[in-house]
């Protein structure tokens, strides 16, 4: 059995703060970003993993939700926990609270090269309840899962992943996930539109020496469903580049650039129609840049971050600021703590 954990705090200053109920509405703030522990077994035919504690999930382009409220509105004090049955060296089955296989960024700050998650991550499921079959043989890895998508409680999503290691430095991954039936559940973690849609990724990873590069593409689509109030179909498509350069044993520099665009059917002259909004209004787009220098010595780490997000084709009342009409937001963050 192995035990790991994280204790970290975060401070942030931001422009054009969004006045969203239940979130941080001040220009500056400090919070506990992680106080978590992970317990896992890695041998035998039945293996267990449990992650428990408190956490914050800062992400670009969205209001900040403090860690105390994140527990109530997101995934609770045990966000990830599952059992894994090892059938053979190549085949296993996992069931429980599972991290998503969608996207190139993980859910928690300590798992990523940047403090904040990105714009593309905002469109993705993060944690799902379900079961997953995993297969690995040589350079090939694959997985398929039946789950509840965006944490809806209804097991009507199927996710699949296929990854191929070209060589020791290069790999490519294909991911697809989508809803098989209608789900009406809505919460902070479960956006109705995305939870009734589908999402796809192509992810390439290069890792050699001090340099890691991960460019990836993403597409998601929501079809019209009048019974759910989705009057028109909509989609987003975008791309991102994640990069990290290790300068020394203690210092590294990470960067992320991304672009995301939304589109969809118009309403024409239909007075009862409302276009589906997946971003900052129908037909809006956004781009972001993030830089994150990091210092780590033993179990101690400290990292700073500067990020900028810009909206194009903003729909009135869908942006940043107190009146939701600002087109950009700049943030400066500091996260420090211990990884043990």
Image (tube, rainbow, N blue to C red):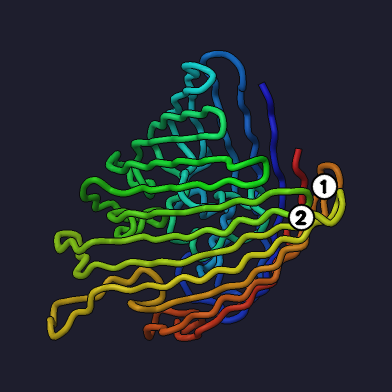
Residue 297 placement, left or right of 316: right
Please say if 210 is above or below 16: above
Quadrant the N terminus occupies: top right
Q: Judge the density around disc 2: few (<14), some (14-19), many (≥20) Cα neighbours within 10 Å.
A: many
Residue beneath label 2, please?
A: 336
Residue linked to disc 1: 300
Q: Position of residue 102 (x, y in %)?
A: 46, 49
Residue furthest top as drawn: 44
> x%, y% of residue 226?
15, 63
Number of marks in the rendered image: 2
Quadrant of residue 129 in the image?
A: top left
> Is there CB contact under 8 Å for labels 2 and 1?
yes
Q: Position of residue 245 (x, y in %)?
A: 76, 57
Residue 156 disc label:
none
In the rendered structure, the answer to whether residue 295 lies left or right of residue 167 reads right
Q: Quadrant of residue 60?
A: bottom right
| Position of the C terminus by quadrant | top right
């Amino acid at each position: 059995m192995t035990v790991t954990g994280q204790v970290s705090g975060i401070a942030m200053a931001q422009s054009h703060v969004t006045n969203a109920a239940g979130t941080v509405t001040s220009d500056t703030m400090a919070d506990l970003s992680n106080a978590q522990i992970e317990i896992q077994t890695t041998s035998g035919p039945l293996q267990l993993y449990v992650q428990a504690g408190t956490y914050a999930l800062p992400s670009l382009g969205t209001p900040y939700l403090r860690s105390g409220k994140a527990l109530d509105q997101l995934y609770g004090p045990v966000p990830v926990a599952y059992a894994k049955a090892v059938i053979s060296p190549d085949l296993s089955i996992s069931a429980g609270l599972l991290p998503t296989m969608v996207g190139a960024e993980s859910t928690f700050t300590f798992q990523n090269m940047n403090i904040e998650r990105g714009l593309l991550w905002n469109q993705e499921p993060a944690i799902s309840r379900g079961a997953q079959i995993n297969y690995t043989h040589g350079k090939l890895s694959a997985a398929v899962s039946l789950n509840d998508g965006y944490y809806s409680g209804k097991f009507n999503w199927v996710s699949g992943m296929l990854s191929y290691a070209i060589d020791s430095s290069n790999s490519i991954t294909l991911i697809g996930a989508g809803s098989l039936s209608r789900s009406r559940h809505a919460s902070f973690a479960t956006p109705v539109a995305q939870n009734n849609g589908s999402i796809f990724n192509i992810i390439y990873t290069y890792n050699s020496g001090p340099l890691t590069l991960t460019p990836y593409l993403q597409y998601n689509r929501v079809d019209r469903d009048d019974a759910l109030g989705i009057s028109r179909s909509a989609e987003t498509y975008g791309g991102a580049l994640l990069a990290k350069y290790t300068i020394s044993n203690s210092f590294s520099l990470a960067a992320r650039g991304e672009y995301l665009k939304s589109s969809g059917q118009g309403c024409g002259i239909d007075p009862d129609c409302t276009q589906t909004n997946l971003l900052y209004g129908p037909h809006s787009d956004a781009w972001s840049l993030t830089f994150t220098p990091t210092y780590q010595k033993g179990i101690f780490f400290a990292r700073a971050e500067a990020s900028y997000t810009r909206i194009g084709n903003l729909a009135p009342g869908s942006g940043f600021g107190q009146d939701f009409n600002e087109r950009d937001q700049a943030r400066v963050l500091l996260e420090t703590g211990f990884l043990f």
